[in-house]
Amino acid sequence: MAAIVEFDTAASAIDGLVFVTMRQVSDERGTVRELFRASAFDAAGVRLDAFRQINVTETQAGAVRGMHAEAMTKLVAVVAGEALGVYVDLRAGSSTAGAVVTAPLVPGKQVLVPSGVANGFQALVDGTQYAYCFDHEWQPHMAGTACSPLDPALGIDWPLAIDPEDRAQISAKDVAAPSVADVLGARRG
């Protein structure tokens, strides 16, 4: 007997950041999840342009990727494993500038991340696979910004301890990224 979970969306505390439950059909063989169906997003009032690039990372437990806010919209999802997703509004003119949202991510859940909102995550189990669908192709030195995932002002309670010197847990680039206050101060100034 098939079990169906219907597509659904929910707003968040960050303007334009949307949590998505994928349509899922499960039976004795397993589960089919709709990573993207334009008509479902359109019906929910969430307009997405065509994707220009799709990446999948595989990350070990405890490792952190992010906080990156390139000038592109992202639809992100865990396709295997578990993660804590973290999102920070780095848009200086936004009504929610500086807001931080965290969410547990498992297969079947997605997050639509608007341009200028930083996206990051910590893998909670080995082999966590995280898919990124971008509406623009990633380019070195493209417009955007980042903030340090270790910035205490973010108030993130990372589930697994992070050693900032361990490159298997966090990149030197992410550790060296500015604080959220520096990013927003530079954009206001």
Image (cartoon, grey):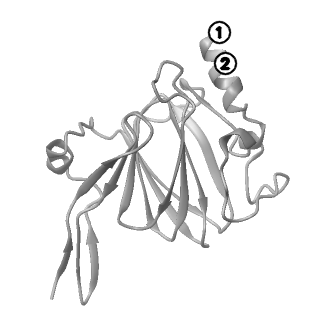
Residue 120 relative to residue 109: left or right: right
Question: Which quarter of the image is occupied by the N terminus?
Answer: bottom left
**Farthest-out residue, top:** 189
Q: Mark 2, residues whose alpha carbon is within 10 Å: few (<14), some, or many (≥20)? A: few
Tell me the residue at 73%/58% (across/down). 169
> CA–CA distance between discs 1 and 2?
6 Å
On residue 49, the disc is none
Considering depth in this image, is 161 or 167 the residue closer to the camera? 161
Is any atom of residue 151 visible in this view? no
Tell me the residue at 54%/23% (across/down). 143
Considering depth in this image, is 161 or 127 the residue closer to the camera? 161
- Callout 2 secondary element: helix
Tell me the residue at 74%/43% (across/down). 152
In the image, is residue 11 above or below residue 180? below
Residue 189 relative to residue 8: left or right: right
Q: Quadrant of residue 151?
A: top right
Q: Tag 2: residue type?
A: Gly
Tell me the residue at 25%/62% (across/down). 34
Asked if labels 2 and 1 touch by Cβ distance under 8 angstroms, the answer is: yes
**Farthest-out residue, right:** 165
Residue picked out by circle 1? 189
Q: Mark 1, residues whose alpha carbon is within 10 Å: few (<14), some, or many (≥20)? A: few
Considering depth in this image, is 172 or 125 the residue closer to the camera? 125
Residue picked out by circle 2? 185
In the image, is residue 143 above or below residue 5? above
Residue 73 picture location, percent across and down: 40, 36
Is any atom of residue 141 visible in this view? yes
Residue 20 picture location, percent across and down: 32, 54
Q: Tag 1: residue type?
A: Gly
Considering depth in this image, is 49 or 16 the residue closer to the camera? 16
